[in-house]
Amino acid sequence: MRTLIVDDEMHVREELETLLSETGEYLVLGTCSNAIQALRAVKAMRPEVMFLDIHMPRVDGFQFLGMIDPERMPLVVFVTAYDEYALKAFEESALDYLLKPVQAERLARTTEKLKRFLREGSRPAYESPSLERIPCISGHGIKLVDVAEIDFVRSSESGVHLVTDKGEFLTELTLTVLEAKVPILARCHKQILVNLRQIDEITRQEASSLIRTRSGKLVPVSRRFLPQLKERLLIR
Amino acid sequence: MKLLFSLIQVASFFLFVAYAYCNSPMFRMRRLETASRQDLAVLYLFFSVISIGGTYLGLPVHGALANTRAIGPVLAGLVGGPYLGLAVGLTGGLHRYFYGGFTATACGVSTTVEGLLGGVVHLYLARRFGSERPLSPVTAFLTMMVAEALQMIIILLVARPFSDALQLVKVIAFPMIAANSAGAAIFMSILKDRRDLYDQVGAASTARALRIAGRTLGPLAKGFTPEVAPELAKIIQEETGVGAVAITDTQTVLAFVGIGSDHHKPGMALAAECHRAITQHDVLFMDGAHEPYHCGYSDQCTLGSVLVVPLQVDGEVIGTIKLFEPASKRFLSINRTLGEGLAHLLATQLLRARYQEQKNLLVLAELKLAHAQINPHFLFNSLTTIQAIMRRDANRARELLNHLSTFFRMNLKRSPEFSTLEEELTHVNAYLEIEKARFQEQLTVEIDVDPTMLQVKLPTFTLQPLLENAIKHGIADKLEPGSARIHAFWEDGAARIDVEDDAGTYFERKERGKDGLGLGIVEKRIRNLLKGESGLTVACDPHVRTCVSIRIPAEEARA
C-alpha cells in the first residue's frame, strides 16, 4: 500500500516507518513533519493510506483533513498518544487509530482493515470542520490567512492564489476544497471564488457581469455561475 | 444664711442618693439615642423620686417651702431631653400642687416649666454641640440658676396675695438659687464621672481584647496544636494578668503558664471541671467563695478560683481555656467577661485557620489532578520516543529512561508545599532531557540562573509547569525551530524568574481556552504564598515571544 507518514516528531516517524516496513505490506512514499508539507505530498504522491498525528504545529490533523481534495483523499489512520477529544472524534469519522507507542500486533489488525477497505474500494467520509485559516506559502515560511481577509481566490497555471488587501498568497488547497470548506466563498467563475461578504456591487456588461469588491477590485462573473451567485446573495 | 446651709444639707442628701444610684446595678447610662424604654422609665422614676423627696424635705418658710425639688426635673431634662424633663416636672409639680399652701399653684406650674427648660437646654446644646455637651456641671449650674430665677418670677406672678409672695421671694430667692445650682452641678458631675469611668474601662478592655486577637492570629493560623498552645497561653496570661492560664484539648492539658506550673504539667489528664465544661458546652466559673475550687493535682496549690471556657469550632468542643486566680486574689469580673469573649475569638480564628487549610488542600488536589491529566500524555509521548531510539542507540534510550523515572519520582515524592529553586531546576532538567530528545533540533532551552538564588523558596511545581506550557503550547506549535529561556535574577531585592518562549502564542491559546491548567494553578499557589498578592505576570508579543514572570519578595523567598 502506498503510504504517507505525517508526524511532527522525528523519532515517531522513524519508528512508524520501521514498523510499517516490517509488515511487508506498505510502501512508505515519504514522511512529513507538518500539515503543509503533507498537503503538498498528498497532491504529488497520491498515497492510498496516511498515518496521521493529531497534534501538529499550526494546523492540526483534523484541520489538515479538511484541506485535502476529496478526490485524492487517502485512507486515514490517526496516531496519537492520549487524547480524549481525539478519541471521541475517531469513533465518528476515522477508519482506525493507533495509540503511541505503537504496538506491532495492534498495527497488524489495522493493516488487515486497510487491505479490506482498499479491496472493496470503499471510502469512509471524513467529516471535518470548516476552515477558518488557510495555510499559504510566503517566502520560506507559512502564513495562515484568515478567511475573512480574502477578497477572492483565483486559480491559474501557477496555482491557487488568495487575493487579499495585503497581497496575493499561493496555497496548496484546491478551489474545490476551498469552495466546500469555506462557507463565505462562492463560485463566480470557473477559476474564481469570491468572498460573499466583500461584494460591494455587481454590474452587468453585455456578455458577462463584473463584481466590485469593497476594496475596489474587479472580479469577473461568468454567465453560468451568475444565477447561483444571485441566489446565495439573496438568501444571505 | 441659715436657710442656705439647711438647703445645702438637704441637697447633700440627694447627692448621697445620686452616688448610691450611680454605683448600683440600675445605673446604665447609655447614650440617649440608644436608650431603651426601660432605661427611660428608670431615669423617670429616679428623677421623680428626687423631685418629690425635695418637696418632703423642704423647709417651711412663711407658709411655703424652701426646697430642692427643681433638681429632679432640671437634671432629667438635661440628661434625657424635653419629654423626660416635662414628665418629671409634671410629676413633681402635681405632687407639689396637692401638697397645698398659698404657693401650691405657682410651684406646681414652675416645677413643670423648670423640667421643660432643662429639656430645651438639652435640645439646644445637643443639636448645636453634640449629645455630650448638656452633660456638663457648668451647664447644670447655669440652667439651674435660670430655672430657679424663673420660679421666683412665676411665684410673684401667680401666688396671691402678692405682698406675701414678695415677702417669701425675698427670703428664699438667694438660698434656693445658690443651693440648687450648686447641688445640680455636683449631681451632674457625679453622673458624668461615673459614666466616663465606664467608658474608660470599656475602652481598656476593648483594647485588650483587640490586642489578644492580634497576637493570637499568627500562632492560630497553624491550627490548634500542642505546639501552638504554650504560646497562646502565654499571650492570654500576659494580656489578662490572671494568676495562671491553661489550654487543654478534650483529653489532656496542652499548656499551662503561671502560678502552679510546678505541678500543672502539659500532658496531664483533664480536671473534673474541664470535663463538666466540655460535656455541658458551657462556661464554668468557680469563684472560690460560693463554689470553691480545689486543685486536683496538689494540696499545696494556691490557686483558688477558675474560669473554664470551652472552645467550640463548628459546634464541636475541641478543648478549653482555663483562667486561674490564686486564693489570695479576687477573680475580676472583667477577666471573666474577657475570658468568655476570648473563647469566641479563638474559635473564630481557628475556623479561619481550618478554612485556610482546606483551601490549600483544594489547590493541592487541583494540582495533583492537573498532573494526573498531563502526565499520561507526556508519559506516552516519552515512551514512544524512547522506543524509537532504542532501535538505534540502546545506551541513549537507557539514559532517557533514567531521566523519565527521575521526573516521575520527583512528581510523587516532593514536599507538597515548598521547594528551593535548585530542586525545581532538577525537576525541570529531567523533564527537559526528554523533551529535547523528542523535539531534537526543534527545541533549544537556555537556563540562566543567578547561583545565589538556588535556595530561593518557591511553591513546589512552579517552574516545570511554566516551561511545559512554553514548550507544549508554544514551541511545539511552531513550524520553525523554537527556543525557550529560564532566567532567574534578583530585581530590587525580589527574586524574579522569567520563563520565555519565542512562539508568542499566549493570546491565541488563551482565546482557544488552551492556556493550560498549569498556569492557573501556579498563579494561585504563588498568590497563596504572597498572601493574596499576585506574583505572576504574563507579557506576550504575538508571534514573537511570551514571557511569564514570577516575582517573589525577598522576605518570602528566603523564609
Image (spheres, coloured by chain):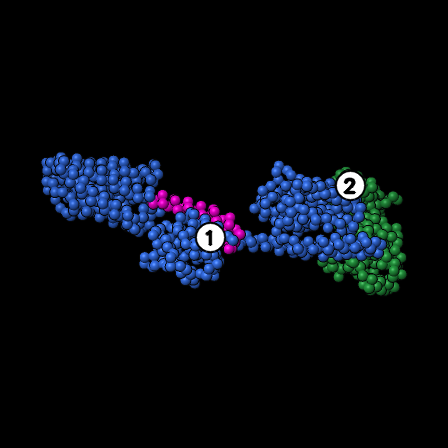
Chain colours: A green, B blue
**Residue A199 visible at all:** no
In the image, what residue occupies the spot 62% across and 46% down? Answer: B457
Return the residue nearer the eye: B233 or B216.
B233
Range of residues picked out in magenta: B198-226
Location of residue B145 by image quarter:
top left
Q: Which amino acid, by three-letter code, is at mark 1?
A: Leu
In the image, what residue occupies the spot 65% across and 55% down? Answer: B368
**Residue B506 visible at all:** yes
Please give the chain letter of the residue carrying mark 2. A
Return the residue nearer the eye: A188 or B66.
B66
- The local secondary structure at tag 1 comes to helix
- Measuring from the top left, give residue A98's x and y in whole percent: 79, 60
- Please say if the residues under marks 2 and 1 sit with CB atoms less than 8 Å apart: no
Return the residue nearer the eye: B349 or A223.
B349
Q: Which amino acid, by three-letter code, is at mark 2?
A: Thr
Tell me the quarter of the image containing the N terminus of chain B: top left
Q: Main secondary structure of the magenta part?
A: helix
Question: What residue is shown with label 2?
Answer: A164
- The local secondary structure at tag 2 comes to strand
Q: How crowded is mark 1: few (under 14 residues within 10 Å), some or many (20 or more)?
A: many
Question: What residue is shown with label 1?
Answer: B346
Please give the chain letter of the residue carrying mark 1. B
Q: Magenta includes B201?
A: yes
- Measuring from the top left, give residue A56's x and y in whole percent: 77, 51
Mark 2–mark 1 Cα distance, whole angstroms, equals 70 Å
Tell me whether marks 2 and 1 sit on the same chain: no
Q: How crowded is mark 2: few (under 14 residues within 10 Å), some or many (20 or more)?
A: some
- Measuring from the top left, give residue B257's x and y in whole percent: 44, 52
Q: Magenta includes A22?
A: no
